[in-house]
Image (cartoon, coloured by chain):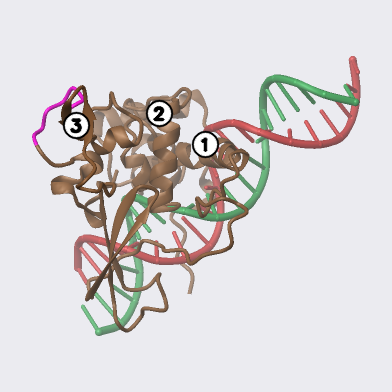
Chain colours: A brown, B red, C green
Amino acid sequence: MGRSPCCEKAHTNKGAWTKEEDDRLIAYIRAHGEGCWRSLPKAAGLLRCGKSCRLRWINYLRPDLKRGNFTEEEDELIIKLHSLLGNKWSLIAGRLPGRTDNEIKNYWNTHIRRKLLSRGIDPSTHRPINEPAQEVTTISFSSAAVKVEEKITSGFVIKEEKSPVRERCPDLNLDLRISPPYHHQSEPLKTGGRTSSICFACSLGIQNSKDCNCSNGTSSSGTGYDFLGLKNGVLDYRSLEMK
DNA sequence: AACCCCGCCAACCGCTATCAC
DNA sequence: AGTGATAGCGGTTGGCGGGGT
């Protein structure tokens, strides 16, 4: 059984948006705010499907969009996040202010995939291309969780709470938590005779990030990591902020 | 100048998740 | 609990522009 169409296709425009349509959409949202996309086109005097309006606003017209080239810092962060989250573009976009899921998805497919391939890394598994195939762990959700297993992937410790029933299907009934990179307690970093620790942001190579809270960084939010929302050093995947 | 190829990216499509009744 | 409506997500498509021949 298919879904009913979100709008009457016979009476809607498709394809590229005109300046006038953009202006109408911006003016309407400025006056009335976002929400109720289905009724928005009619109210705004647009011959567009609500879905199309939403996409246009979110991906192109929103005033907080950054636009422009991605920085090297953003590149690396996207790679790291993708290695953890896979193609969860909206989650990845949620950690890159001013970037949209569509933009990141396009950028991944056009630039980063090639970049990783040129480094000899498989963009989907984040493993060396010539490395023999290994079991791939996918992050997914579940409330039924019993056993906990830790894995170290790309510098992150991932705690898997495994269901005893579905263990052979890693995509099912997993409840994951992502913690900061594993550091041996016996190997503290020493700087100029002083012992210091490196924060998670620095471990990703973004020392000047607002998420940096190690002793080398500028922020000082006390002990424990808070990168990517990792309160108390552990990220509950379900708490990742959605757009 | 004309044609072709290819990369980029905005937009669409189909699906799932969520909510209201 | 079941159903329909709506929002949101991710994969895919297609138009456009730039570079090469």
- Disc 2 secondary structure class: helix
Q: Is residue A129 visible?
A: yes
The residue positioned farthest toward the left in the image shown: A222
Dot 3 amino acid type = Cys
Looking at the rendered image, the disc whose residue lies closer to the viewer, 3 or 1, is: 3
Q: Chain of mark 2?
A: A
Q: Indicate left or right for A231 with A118 as reference.
A: left
Write down the residue under mark 1. Answer: A107
**A5 part of magenta stretch:** no
Residue at horizontal 46%, vertical 27%? A70
Q: Indicate left or right for A209 with A107 as reference.
A: left
Looking at the rendered image, the disc whose residue lies closer to the viewer, 3 or 2, is: 3
Residue at horizontal 29%, vertical 27%? A207
Between A3 and A191, the one nearer to me in the picture? A191
**A219 part of magenta stretch:** yes
Res A199 quadrant in image: top left
Q: The magenta stretch spans which residues?
A: A215-222
Q: Is residue C13 above or below residue A66?
A: below
Res A27 quadrant in image: top left
